[in-house]
Image (cartoon, grey):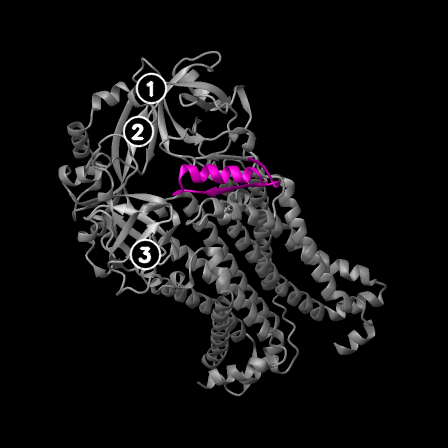
Amino acid sequence: MKNFNMALRSLFKKGRSNGIKILALAVGLAMGLVLVAKVCFERSYDNFYPDNERIYLVKSDLNRDGKKDSWGQVSGAIAPGMKAEVPGVEFATRYTRIGENNELIMTPEEQYLRATILLADTSFFDIFPRPILIGNPKEALARPGYVMISRSLAEKMGGVGDAVGKTFVRDANHGSPFIIGGVFEDIPENSHLRYDAVASLAAMSERSTTNWVGNDRYIAYVKLLPGTDPNGLAPAIRRMQERNQDMEGLKKAGVDLSYSIFPLQDIHNNSKDVKDMNYMLLFMAIILISIAVLNYILVVISTLIGRAKEVAVHKCYGASGKNIFGMILSESFLHLLLSLLLAAFLIVIFKGRIEELLSASLSALFTLPTLSILLAICVVVFAVTGLVPTWLFMRIPVASAFRSMKESKRYWKLCLLFVQFVATAYLVALLITISRQYDTMIASDTGYAYENLVYCDTRGAGQQQRELAMAELRRLPQVDLVSCCTSLPIYSPSGNNISIPGDDRDLFNIADMYFVGDSYFDLMEIPVVEGEAFRPNEANADKIMVSRRFTELMEKTAGWTGSVIGKGVIVSEHSDSSSVFTITGVFDDFRIGSLKGPDMRASVFFYATPDCYNPPVNILIKMNTLSSETLSEVNRVLTEAIPGRRVEASVLKMDIVSQYQDDRDFRDAIMISGIVTLLIALIGLLGYTADETNRRGREIAIRKVNGATAESILRMLSRDVSYIALPALAIGAAIAYINAEGWLEKFAERIHLNLFMFIGAALFVYVIIIACVLIRAWNVANENPVESIKAD
């Protein structure tokens, strides 16, 4: 306690630089610990489910002409089939999504809420159990139209206790109400499967839920019995297929279909994007914490000479090594404690920005297991910040009390500065790379025009209402063109298979964009490179538009040569009774999805007829002027034409930009880390420069007496710093180059890594370093040498 009281009294002593030490350590720890917490959060996905190591996703594995593919969706009968016929499977479930994530729902009181809704069978909560607050999930999910909802959704509807028996509808389908049969506890944030409501799968047709081939819209999971080897299930799964699927028919179609299981724990953690992000975030955290700790030690070394006499006097009055050890360690502990308190304060102050950047709440980031890891890191930090200064102070000789101590610890300082410069150059160079890639993604050519383009999802509205809305929109002077489509190009659509008359083979799978209205290709400015687009007021029901990639695949798989215009193809799902579609035009390939995961399949469009089964619910509006006023006018027309529903136009460009929100957040995190690292490094550099000018004060004065100019003095000090700065910056830029190459691999379209870009980043940091040295040493270089010699 005595040592701690002494540490408290020493906090505000002049010359200790305690404020700088605590502030720099606090900022570094705040950012570093938050990033470590984010990595722990990402690594903890789905670990809250009991027996999660026994839960597996069922995947479809396809081999077509030697080309292998795998995806996490199956036909409706696969999950119950595995439960019934595959030994070792304890439970099996399947679900399918209905509507969009976070879609609008409406209560009878016309209260609008947003929810993600799944349709699942009665075994869903056997595999993914949640605390049930009210109701019986088995009974609810066995009854068509019934639904289990989350606590948060129930509270928005008036409370958990009053939820059962209430109803709501999807805004896209007012004709099918859901009856609430129970409430479950909210899904934690670290789940790969987030939802607000689970409705009964019994609402789906029996054909959909019991088919063995095709209609693979279901996501299936199995939970194995304890001790079951997942690698030993393949023979039993194959026998199940042979009993229930037309294996000969699949073989004739050139398809080898099989199923495999994939661990639940690896669905998120095994993603390359997640692993790359975790690696980079952890590396950044190590850099930030290390830089903060090294800066603390650097400042301690800078104050070493000033405190040498104090420590020596303590020794003269009988202080043992143990006493010195306790005194210095208490100071370090107090500094760390204050730094952690300040770090916690900063985290709370910037709570909103942290949660936005890391896409997780603070309560989800700082769980008890994570806090134990962070505590261990703090113990390591305390060991370094406590033991290193203690070791240095214990080596101070008693003679320092009677003579001036000139030991500079210069090499210690240079080593610490070297590491800080490496980290700063690394983060600045990486920031430039990420910023350029982000700008490239935002500005890249999508193959279609989205400037001044807005759209409105009108699901649930009738065909006549849509046509009325489109007619009224065409009358607006701010509108150039209006059309409609089933699927927007920013989303990856469903797939269907292509075949040709007289050939049983499935040639390839296409991205089915489904139906479009008149003027679609003109509005989207997608070039038609052969043939022509759908003509208005003509019989287009049996016509199809195909992409350039489609023609290339037909040449490879079907041996087509020459023009494809006028030739016929069969498209699964569309071609009932083997009806043939005639190719009327070929359009240029455009991007489907985003640059991070573009859908590279060939694509097709069908013409929207009044009775098409998957109607073009998205109204597309090409504006000649886009502003808040014109958007309000569009919304007014939509609301009047489609009453009773919440319809609102969205700007397509904003949706395209939002596809890269994670990359923008990552860029911002790197930028903040780079700024913090640079500031901490500059604090250390300024302290080092001040120490050097004080230590070499007599030398500088003598040089000036002998004719040295202020310019030559500044050049000398800058040269000394350059000896460590230049190689450190080169190393930092080289590490950034290596990491940037790996990070860019996930993008289909990426920037070219130019060596000069990294050299420029290093030079940028170098200029800042030299500028700080010159500013800090300016007064000493211009000081009267006589005064300097007198002071010394």
Q: Nearer the viewer, residue 464 or 105?
A: 464
Q: Nearer the viewer, residue 774 or 520?
A: 520
Question: Is residue 193 among the parts visible in the rendering?
Answer: no
* Residue position marked by numbered label 3 in the rendering: 187
**Against 486, is 779 above or below?**
below
Residue 44 vs residue 473: left or right?
Answer: left
* Rendered image quadrant of residue 450: top right
Q: Secondary structure at mark 1?
A: loop
Question: Is residue 294 among the parts visible in the rendering?
Answer: yes
Q: Residues within 10 Å of mark 3 (few under 14, many from 20)?
A: some
Marks 3 and 1, the one that precedes in the sequence? 3
Residue 55 vs residue 452: left or right?
Answer: left
Q: Amino acid at mark 1?
A: Ser
* Residue position marked by numbered label 1 in the rendering: 579
Marks 1 and 2, the one that precedes in the sequence? 2
Q: Secondary structure at mark 3?
A: loop
Which stretch is magenta?
Answer: 452-481
Marks 3 and 2, the one that precedes in the sequence? 2
Residue 193 is inside the magenta segment: no
Residue 462 is inside the magenta segment: yes
**Foreground tag (3 vs 1):** 1
The residue located at (14%, 39%) in the rendering is 84
Q: Amino acid at mark 2?
A: Leu
Q: Residues within 10 Å of mark 1 (few under 14, many from 20)?
A: some
On the image, the x and y values in percent for residue 247 come to: 21, 24
The Cα atoms of the two marked residues, 1 and 2, are separated by 26 Å
* Residue position marked by numbered label 2 in the rendering: 62
**Against 45, is 302 above or below?**
below
On the image, the x and y values in percent for residue 500 come to: 35, 16
Q: Nearer the viewer, residue 485 or 767?
A: 485
